[in-house]
Amino acid sequence: MKSLTTLYLIIFTMIAIPSISQSLPETGISGVYEVMIGVDNADYAKKYFADFGFKTIDSSTISSKEAQKIYGVNSKLTSYRLQNGNIDSHGLLRILEWEKPLGEGIGYAPVETIGSRIAVMMTKDIFRLYDIYQTARAVGKKPWLPTKPIADDLFGLNTGERDFFNRPVLVRENAVYGEFFNHIFFQRYGYKIPGYGTIKSETPLKTSEFTHHDFIINAKSMEQMSYLSSALGLQAEDEPVIDGDWLKGPKRVFQMEPGYSHWYQGFVSPNNICGKLKFFIPRGDKTNKSNHQRIGEKGITLHSFYTPKIKMVHQLVSGHKLNPTPILKNEFGEQSFLFSDTAGVSWQIIEKTDEPKNKPITKLEFELTD
């Protein structure tokens, strides 16, 4: 007879995630492939991200003339593409080492500063990370602001009365805001989502690839992001909603003061449950540094997608009057183009016709554990 634990481990629960009925163009677009960070010292960046499991898989240097043509930045550029474990379908990192950065970027700033970007990854030990950043904050060599981890049932997975034997099913999360990079970490308790966060046992900080990405945008409404569906083929999860200080997770992660709220909307690729995008518009006075979100400045300034239909996507983006650059080979020899939207978000679209070795998961499933 199987034990109760074994039976519990094989329970699969499908959760209905609300979504809008949309007619999407079949662009073959990926989830977010890479988050790109501008730096003037790639050695530090590579050392830092190595502790999160990222290893350099490619690098390239181009002249200031070539960088001007591709990125509109008159600076010599050395790029490093980093991958976490075997995950090559999403969640990669590209370090852009500019010889002459255009500026310091947004840097260490108040939470929900407009223009900020945050990259999200799963961990097996969120309190260890919290302690590490608390120590780093006390030393003060680089400013870090870690929020205390908080647990919540984000997906309504708890049923019946919870006690020692009917254990809570939760996710615990926190944010770490820094001059160099902004993180959100999460740890699951009592459930798994296959294909959404993979942690290799030898990774020093027990962290995964980037699973999703947060954008604090300079916009009046989420209508400005609708091109993500009509031009790129991403699925809007639901209509825009208001999150506020009454929700304990967002309250803690975004350091919400009493009476504060923001608009929220999420988008996900129909071809990958990972590489999800989350957009936030503050509903109150916030520092606006979106003019420092330019490609060529330091910090997170750019994200990439890939598609086997780059000409189709280029035409769709052009049709939305988003002024894409011509399709050119980027520093890695990939056909690509760039564009920026009216909310200050910049993208690089890359052509890839080969299937990734790590086949992305397209169906969101929740698997309960003990």
Image (cartoon, rainbow, N blue to C red):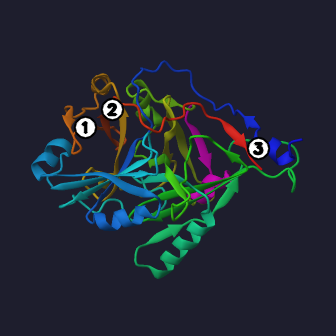
Please state which amino acid type lies under the numbered disc 3: Leu
Residue 155 is a magenta residue = no
Q: CA distance from mark 2 to mark 3?
A: 37 Å
Q: How many marks?
A: 3
The kind of residue on which mark 2 rests is Lys
Residue 104 pos. (x, y %): 28, 63
**Quarter-wise, where is residue 300 in the image?**
bottom left
Q: Position of residue 330 (x, y in %)?
A: 22, 41
Q: In the rendering, at what x and y percent does residue 337 appear?
A: 25, 35
Residue at position x 74%, y 41% from top?
Answer: 156
Q: Residue at x 61, y 53 (%)?
A: 250
Residue interval drawn in magenta: 239-254
**Which residue position is annotated with label 3?**
9
Element at label 2: loop
In this picture, residue 200 sits left or right of residue 14: left
Q: Earlier in the sequence, mark 1 or mark 3?
A: 3
Which residue is the site of mark 2?
Answer: 352
Q: Residue 33 placed where, x, y %?
A: 40, 41
